[in-house]
Amino acid sequence: MRIIRYTDTHMKQDSLITLPNPHLRQISKKVGYIDEEIQELIKRMEAITLDWESSREHEVSVALAAIQIDAPIRIVIIRNDFDNKKDKTFHALLNPTITKYEGDIIEDFEGCLSITDLYGKVPRYAKVRVKALDITGNEIRFSATGFLARVLQHEIDHTHGKLFVDHIKDSPSAFYELNSEGILQQLDYAKDIQRSKILWGAS
């Protein structure tokens, strides 16, 4: 297990790993013991997430999985208020698991800090039930709907080495980019996506 310490003096967004880095495809290991190093890792995740957002006028960083900073540990952080960029607080979930998927499957836009300048229209369940540990080690169980349910599915996918593009790789109309005015524009699948070595590797 790689230990990442919050005492590093420069926590910049280049601490994120992005495709085509193969480490994003790793399966993350369970947190066995919550110690000071785990607490420091969570703080580092928060700092890196906010640093990524600071240079982006039209985007808000709502969540991050530890694997995205090259720590293959089952930890995700979720922003407390998705609609308020001034609220820079998060809560952490350790060993999160979706215990039940419910409701309709709905397509909506997703982006990822580990996939540069790309959005996708991704199908997700409208409701999920989740169990996890909080930062004190207590088990928590809750239901989530709407955007929170989508965020949880996206982040828990990361702990299994799965990215949002994997859900839409055979959907030519599902890929978008954000232009300089903050408007999503559809990409040419054959030209920009299908043969992308960044997304799918060299094969």
Image (spheres, rainbow, N blue to C red):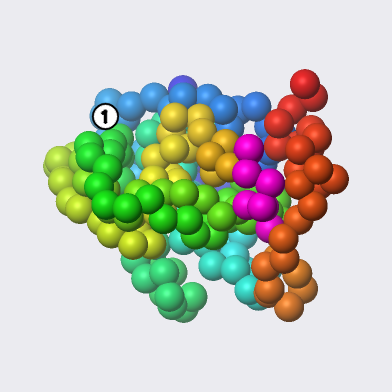
- The span picked out in magenta is 169-176
> Which quadrant would residue 32 be assigned to in this image?
top left
Dot 1 crowding, Cα within 10 Å, few <14, some 14–19, many 20+: few
Residue 24, image x, y percentages: 58, 32
Residue at 41%, 69% in the rendered image: 82
Residue 94, image x, y percentages: 30, 40
Residue 35 versus residue 110 in the image, above or below: above
- Asked whether the viewer can see residue 91, the reply is no
Residue at 22%, 37% in the rendered image: 99
21 inside magenta stretch: no
Left or right of 134: which side holds 75? Answer: right
* Count of numbered circles on the image: 1
172 inside magenta stretch: yes
Residue 92, image x, y percentages: 33, 50
Farthest residue in the right direction? 191
Q: Nearer the viewer, residue 167 or 118?
A: 167
SS under mark 1: loop
Q: Amino acid at mark 1?
A: Tyr
Left or right of 66: which side holds 114? Answer: right
> Which quadrant would residue 79 be assigned to in this image?
bottom left
Residue bearing the label numbered 1 = 33
Residue at 72%, 60% in the rendered image: 186
Q: Nearer the viewer, residue 203 or 141?
A: 203
- Asked whether the viewer can see residue 117, the reply is yes
Q: Nearer the viewer, residue 42 or 81?
A: 81
Position of the C terminus by quadrant: top right
Left or right of 26: which side holds 92? Answer: left
Residue 183, image x, y percentages: 68, 73
Residue at 32%, 30% in the rendered image: 31
Secondary structure character of the magenta stretch overall: loop
